[in-house]
Amino acid sequence: MAATIPSLRLPAGIDMPAYGIGTWRMGESPRVRAAEVNALRHGIESGVTLIDTAEMYGDGEAESIVADAVGSGRDRLFIVSKVLPSNASRRGTVAACERSLKRLKTDRIDLYLLHWRGSYSLADTVAAFEELRAAGKIRAWGVSNLDHDDMQELWHVPHGRNCQADQVLYNLTRRGIEFDLLPFCHQHAIPVMAYSPLEQARMLRHRILAEVAKRHGASPAQVALAWLLNQGVIVIPKATNTAHADENLGALDLVLTAADLATLDAAFPPPDAPQPLDML
Ligand SMILES: NC(=O)c1ccc[n+]([C@@H]2O[C@H](COP(=O)([O-])OP(=O)(O)OC[C@H]3O[C@@H](n4cnc5c(N)ncnc54)[C@H](OP(=O)(O)O)[C@@H]3O)[C@@H](O)[C@H]2O)c1
């Protein structure tokens, strides 16, 4: 049975699923390409409609893998892709988007992000995003790896407040954004997309995660994802292994109790001072 995935509304009025599939490290080896297409297809058949990719992943090959997995089902999906900072000039952003559209075999990207800040001005990248949006090539734009001070700067750029999301490293072991960036995004109704929500599987052996999981007959990965969903952010776990993908979807049915949240807070304390944004 297909999972029921909650959605949230972007400030522009577009609905976006709160749970998706990541694609970093896909497209790097022809040997596992078929398995990667299969993993995405499996996710889509299981009800996942949000796919997160980037021109950087596999040097564009991850976007081609997404296209192969999506096939004729494009209209049911919400596709996120990202422009590299080295391409994020006024004209370079537009050209990069055109290349991504070709690889994705689609006529629009639902949410197009600046992957991280580089040397081009935010004003130039935003102007290009606005041009792409007016042309219907992207439905919305946002940013990634922008910290609280970057977001404040973006807010003073012409049309900068049209930003619809910030995709950042966020999981139980990386809670720094809760001090200032997350409140800023909440205040402006900007959804946060939590990348590496499982800390690339490194956190899954943590004793406390296992303890909370045991209370629910769940897995540590499900607890880690359910905690993020409970924080009101979008999660995009990546899993090429379909058993992992199925397990992760189970997080949508896991409701953490106040006691669980207190246990997790004690083991993974929230920040009590500003911290620079971590990046992977
Ligand atoms: N904007 C950015 O700068 C940025 C940076 C990093 C990531 N991202 C995005 O966020 C997505 C997710 O982050 P991520 O890929 O870095 O890390 P992640 O989703 O935290 O972890 C992925 C790793 O965990 C394993 N895994 C997944 N589910 C598991 C489970 N239930 N049990 C055990 N292992 C499990 C996967 O293995 P298998 O593949 O073998 O199943 C894979 O090795 C990326 O794919 C990408 O789309 C964005």
Image (spheres, rainbow, N blue to C red):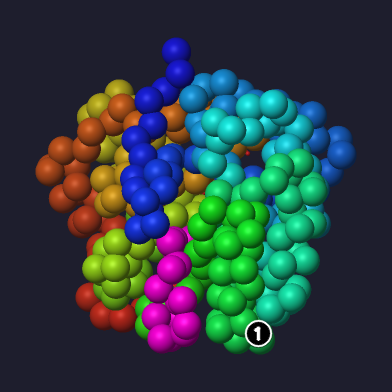
Q: Which residue lies furthest to the left in this view?
A: 258
* Residue 141: image location, x then y, percent: 53, 62
Q: Which residue is drawn at 72% across and 28% down?
A: 71
Q: In this view, does 64 lie above or below 274?
A: above
Question: For residue 59, what is the image quadrant?
Answer: bottom right
Residue type at mark 1 is Tyr
**Horizontally, is 184 left or right of 222 in the view?**
left
Q: In which quarter of the image is the C terminus?
A: bottom right
**Horizontally, is 176 left or right of 166 in the view?**
left
For the image shown, how many numbered marks are present on the structure?
Answer: 1
Question: For residue 83, what is the image quadrant?
Answer: bottom right
Q: Which residue is drawn at 29% across and 50% down?
A: 232
Q: Mark 1 points at which residue?
A: 120
Residue 103 shows in the view: yes
Q: Which of 80 and 148 is in front in this view?
A: 80
Q: In this view, does 275 lie above or below 58?
A: below
* Residue 215: image location, x then y, percent: 23, 29
Which portion, as a residue range, is magenta? 153-168
Q: Is residue 80 above or below residue 161?
A: above
Secondary structure of the residue carrying tag 1 is: loop
Q: Residue furthest top?
A: 1
Q: Which residue is drawn at 63% across and 63% down?
A: 132
